[in-house]
Amino acid sequence: MKILSAKQIYEADRATIKSQAISSTELMERAAFACYEWIIKRFPDRSRLFHVCCGMGNNGGDGLVVSRLLLENGFRVHTHLINFSEHRSDDFKVNLDRLIEMKALVTEVSGVADFPTIEHGDLVIDAIFGIGLKRSPSGFTKKLIQRINNSKAGIISLDFPSGLFSASTVTDKEAVIRANHTLTFQVPKLAFLLPDNQEYVKEWQVLDIGLDKDYLNSADCLYHGSDLELNKGFYKVRKKFSHKGSFGHSLLIGGSFGKIGAMVLASRAALKAGSGLVSTYIPKCGYTAMQSTNPEVMVEVDDENYIQYFNFKTNPTAIGLGPGLGTHLKTKKGFVDFFSNCKAPMVIDADGLNIIAEFSDLSELIPENTILTPHPKEFERLVGKWHDDYAKLDKLLAYSQQHNCVVVLKGAYTAIAHQGKVWFNMSGNPALATAGSGDVLTGIITALLSQGYTSLEASLLGVYIHGRTADLAVEENESIESFSATDAIDYLGRVYKEFV
Ligand SMILES: NC(=O)C1=CN([C@@H]2O[C@H](COP(=O)(O)OP(=O)(O)OC[C@H]3O[C@@H](n4cnc5c(N)ncnc54)[C@H](O)[C@@H]3O)[C@@H](O)[C@H]2O)[C@@H](O)CC1
Ligand SMILES: Nc1ncnc2c1ncn2[C@@H]1O[C@H](COP(=O)(O)OP(=O)(O)O)[C@@H](O)[C@H]1O
Ligand SMILES: [K+]
């Protein structure tokens, strides 16, 4: 799944018009028809009033087509032309003429006095600006946006919430539509995936408008979505004559007094994610807890309450390092020596990352293709503060390139960076915002590395699987609130079944 830039979307439009020998008006009709179909399926009540607010560009043109289709099908519609510019796009003009021919109710809005009265229960279709916005809306257009946001009506944005920029951060927070639903064309937009924009973009749907496949396949994108289709592509089916030695030996290193649970979760997740063998290296105080809760998992121990020697005998295929590790001075010292000499592929999480951040020279020693799994706070410790989500993405790309590693920046749309590209994970929901959920992810990714997936594949697949456990659990027995890290482990089997 590619995430095209605005420039690429305009190019895709042109390629489509050429290859399918259609006009831009026909393409607009197709895009708006897809929106219309979604809207009437979701809001079939014909007594409801639709306020369709149209700008003067092609986004406004989409709105005019939606108005016409709703009217032709017996819905109540009031169309408002937001007169912010003399310039009107050609397809806007064509569709305005069609609407006027139908004697539709169309009002020009040139100032506050023309604002519609929007009642509770009405629906606003926001077609004021799309991806073509160049500067924050101002004057009466901004005031109208505020009026719409303050109304009690539901808001459906066509393609893009008006006021949001396609490739930079919002400059005037009061001049952006806060949409309940956004119906976007063909591909997800980067702006939807960034936490800074969560107030403007809530639910969003991608509607297929049949843009040119050749263009889409060949477009070179910096950003991608990681979905079932992508991950199915590198999922490995097990061979009939495989044995436990075929699927590697994962070693999870971590735990400290009071934080043995992190290691119980990570090692159990590694086992259930298919690692042939799983060992743990933990402080002595966790021995009984580990052996009694995870009988399949082998245990080696270090000092009494924390790890300091890192002198395990296991010869692992992959190492997951950091869950519950703690930052005792002796742990830090042992970590530095161990880390600099480790030859096995590693996943580094939690305090492992915090120690790297504290000793900045350690970043230079990160072995090629190591996987780092920071949450935003841990990432900030590694790279310093950023001023907005775009700057954060720049730092993400730069850090992963500079150290030739995979960085899994966790969040609602976890961003996985490797060799100058970023993939945003499309599975998961806020149920995952629960204690130990990151430890489970470390276990899953370590297990995938052990099974022979590359660092990038293990990261993409691991994050996708982890998110999917929460999606399935919430569809079935759990709620967003009740889901726990243990449930994520219990749902691994169900998720794997979706790949075969
Ligand atoms: N492949 C696709 O995605 C398709 C996209 N279409 C629509 O086309 C839209 C893009 O259309 P446009 O390029 O006409 O742009 P918009 O309709 O998004 O932008 C509005 C117009 O206002 C001007 N403008 C920008 N910022 C302004 C400001 N602050 N104050 C006043 N005027 C401003 C722009 O120059 C532009 O002409 C998409 O978002 C989508 O809705 C569809 O019609 C067809 C297919
Ligand atoms: N709102 C959310 N939507 C989807 N996934 C989320 C959300 N919040 C957190 N997650 C996921 O949950 C996990 C939390 O990891 P982390 O912050 O390390 O938690 P912990 O330290 O408690 O284990 C990450 O994989 C993250 O992507
Ligand atoms: K819009």
Image (cartoon, helix red, strand yellow):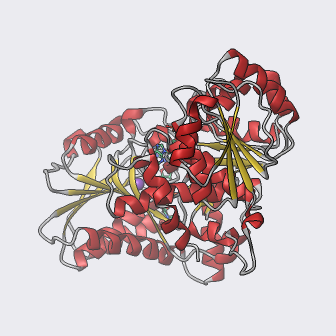
Report whether residue 90 is seen. yes
Identify the image quadrant of residue 233.
Answer: bottom right
Using the image as rendered, state which of residue 458 and residue 79 is in the foreground: 458
Using the image as rendered, state which of residue 261 and residue 192 is in the foreground: 261
Q: Residue at x 24, y 54 (%)?
A: 154
Is residue 73 shown left or right of residue 239? left
Residue with the most extreme bottom position:
21
Is residue 73 shown left or right of residue 60? left
Report whether residue 439 is seen. no
Image quadrant for the N terminus?
bottom right
Using the image as rendered, state which of residue 177 and residue 483 is in the foreground: 483
Is residue 366 shown left or right of residue 87? right
Identify the image quadrant of residue 363.
Answer: top right
Identify the image quadrant of residue 335.
Answer: top right
Height in image: 55 above or below 387? below
Residue 330 position, x and y percent, is 72, 18
Residue 152 position, x and y percent, is 18, 47
Residue 372 position, x and y percent, is 69, 40
Q: Residue at x 50, y 44 (%)?
A: 437
Q: How many marks?
A: 0
Image quadrant for the C terminus?
bottom right
Q: Residue at x 44, y 42 (%)?
A: 433
Residue with the most extreme top position:
329
Using the image as rendered, state which of residue 247 and residue 12 is in the foreground: 247
